[in-house]
Image (cartoon, rainbow, N blue to C red):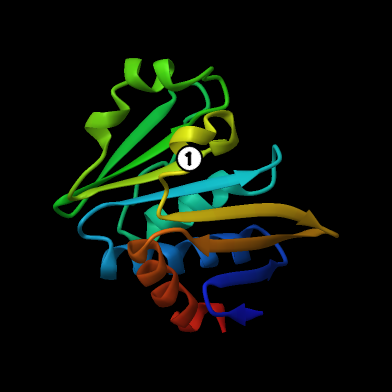
């Protein structure tokens, strides 16, 4: 279903989740040059890292895409930009973000994909785009909404991607 300002997708399997991530990656490449902050919420095993893998693969990352569960941040060069994949599950608050240099990961040419944004809601509220993955039968349901004009532009390109058709 596609309504203005919201994207809802039923994803049958990991391959569908990676395709949806690929479409998001292409949207970031198209309109996210000034930087973008995307949150990825959902229960354990709901597909957050799988979606992030699709984003990174669409952006040309060919090596292993690891979950940032233990490292907290995995960064990847993407052309002249960098994509930072973060996991906030083990963080306790804003002080932990400051300690990990979160502020330095933002800005022009910096893209953030943050798993477990609900752990630090004050920082997550600054995201351009919020994505949620939930279990839906044997598959997953993805819901995405924009919170900023940049997020709305990314969402519009994401929704228009033929791979979602």
Establish if 8 lies above or below 97. below
Task: Name the one closer to the observer, 22 or 101.
Answer: 101
Give the percent coordinates (x, y) of residue 3. Answer: 59, 80
Relative to residue 28, is residue 161 drawn left or right? right
Point 50% across, 78% down: residue: 163
Could one spot residue 67 in this view of the protein? Answer: no
Give the percent coordinates (x, y) of residue 61. Answer: 32, 51
The residue positioned farthest toward the left in the image shown: 80
Q: Which quarter of the figure is the N terminus placed in?
A: bottom right
Give the percent coordinates (x, y) of residue 142. Answer: 64, 61
Count the marks: how many?
1
Could one spot residue 151 in this view of the protein? Answer: yes
Report which quarter residue 55 is drawn in. bottom left
Point 60% across, 45% down: residue: 41
Relative to residue 3, is residue 122 drawn left or right? left
Establish if 42 lies above or below 119. below
State the residue position of label 1. Answer: 124
Task: Name the one closer to the observer, 101 or 148.
Answer: 148
Establish if 80 lies above or below 160. above
Give the percent coordinates (x, y) of residue 15. Answer: 60, 63
Q: Which quarter of the figure is the C terminus placed in?
A: bottom right
Q: Residues within 10 Å of mark 1 (few under 14, many from 20)?
A: some
- Disc 1 secondary structure class: helix
Point 47% across, 50% down: residue: 53
Point 51% across, 20% down: residue: 91
Establish if 30 lies above or below 43. below
């Amino acid at each position: 279903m596609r309504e203005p300002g919201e994207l809802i997708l039923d994803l049958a399997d990991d391959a569908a989740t990676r395709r949806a991530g690929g479409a998001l990656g292409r949207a970031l490449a198209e309109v996210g040059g000034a930087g973008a902050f995307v949150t990825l919420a959902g229960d354990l095993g709901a597909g957050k890292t799988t979606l992030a893998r699709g984003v990174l693969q669409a952006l040309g990352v060919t090596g292993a895409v690891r979950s940032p569960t233990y490292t907290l941040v995995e960064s990847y060069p993407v052309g002249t930009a960098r994509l930072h994949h973060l996991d906030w599950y083990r963080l306790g608050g804003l002080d932990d973000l400051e300690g990990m240099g979160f502020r330095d990961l933002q800005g022009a040419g910096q893209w953030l994909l943050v798993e477990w944004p609900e752990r630090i809601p004050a920082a997550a509220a600054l995201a351009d785009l919020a994505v949620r993955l939930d279990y839906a039968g044997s598959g997953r349901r993805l819901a995405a909404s924009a919170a900023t004009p940049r997020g709305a532009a990314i969402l519009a390109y994401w929704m228009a991607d033929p791979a979602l058709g």
